[in-house]
Amino acid sequence: MPARSSASRRTVLRGAAAAPVAGLGLTACGAPKGRPAAVPTAPVDLGAESEVARGGATLYRDHNVVVSRGEDGTLKAYSTVCTHAGCPINKLQGTTLVCPCHGSEFDAVTGEVVQAPATEPLTELRVKAANGRIVAGPAA
């Protein structure tokens, strides 16, 4: 005679119903707790225009923004929220942004992905120099 399972139908159904809920607690791929992955929703003063050298980039962690300056003096700004899993990027090596969650890398001058797992470029932001200050915000 075959052995009978000790799990009742009710026990199995309870387990199945709880499984999707348990998965909702996994946040390892998102922004760290206590620090939302957000970009400016209105123009913000990032700092002195002199902070961004020609051919270089500056990371503004508090605002999740990177600003680069081309050799011709043109400013570009991008959100530093990783397009792979929404983690705020906190490391800039030269002009390469490195995401701490899964190692995606982005070019701070173009916003393009230079190393997966991300496949989408960073979100470009509007940026300008005004009265010697860098101001960035959402693109229209």
Image (cartoon, rainbow, N blue to C red):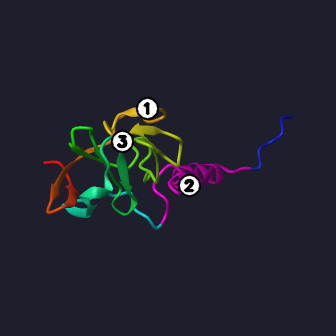
Which label was assigned to residue 130? none
Which label was assigned to residue 22? 2
Q: Amino acid at mark 3?
A: Ala
Q: Nearer the viewer, mark 2 or mark 3?
A: 3
Whether residue 84 is visible here, answered yes or no, is yes
Does residue 95 appear left or right of residue 101 in this picture? left
Q: Quadrant of residue 97?
A: top left
Q: Vertically, is 104 above or below 41?
A: above
Q: Disc count in the image? A: 3
- In this figure, which residue is indicated by the disc labeled 3? 108
Dot 2 alpha-carbon crowd within 10 angstroms: few under 14, some 14 to 19, many 20 or more: few
- In this figure, which residue is indicated by the disc labeled 1? 114
- Percent of width and height locating residue 66: 34, 50
Tell me where the magenta segment starts and ends, as one range.
Answer: 7-33
Residue occupying image coordinates x 36% and y 52%: 58
Q: Amino acid at mark 2?
A: Ala
- Percent of width and height locating residue 108: 36, 42
Q: Nearer the viewer, mark 3 or mark 1?
A: 3
- Percent of width and height locating residue 120: 35, 34
Secondary element type, mark 2? helix
Residue occupying image coordinates x 72% and y 50%: 7
Q: Amino acid at mark 1?
A: Val
Q: Nearer the viewer, residue 80 or 77?
A: 77
Does residue 13 appear left or right of residue 43 in this picture? right
**Could you tell me how far apart the alpha carbons at marks 2 and 3 are, in whole angstroms?**
37 Å
**Could you tell me how far apart the alpha carbons at marks 3 and 1 are, in whole angstroms?**
10 Å
In the rendered structure, which disc, 3 or 1, sits on the residue that comes first in sequence? Answer: 3
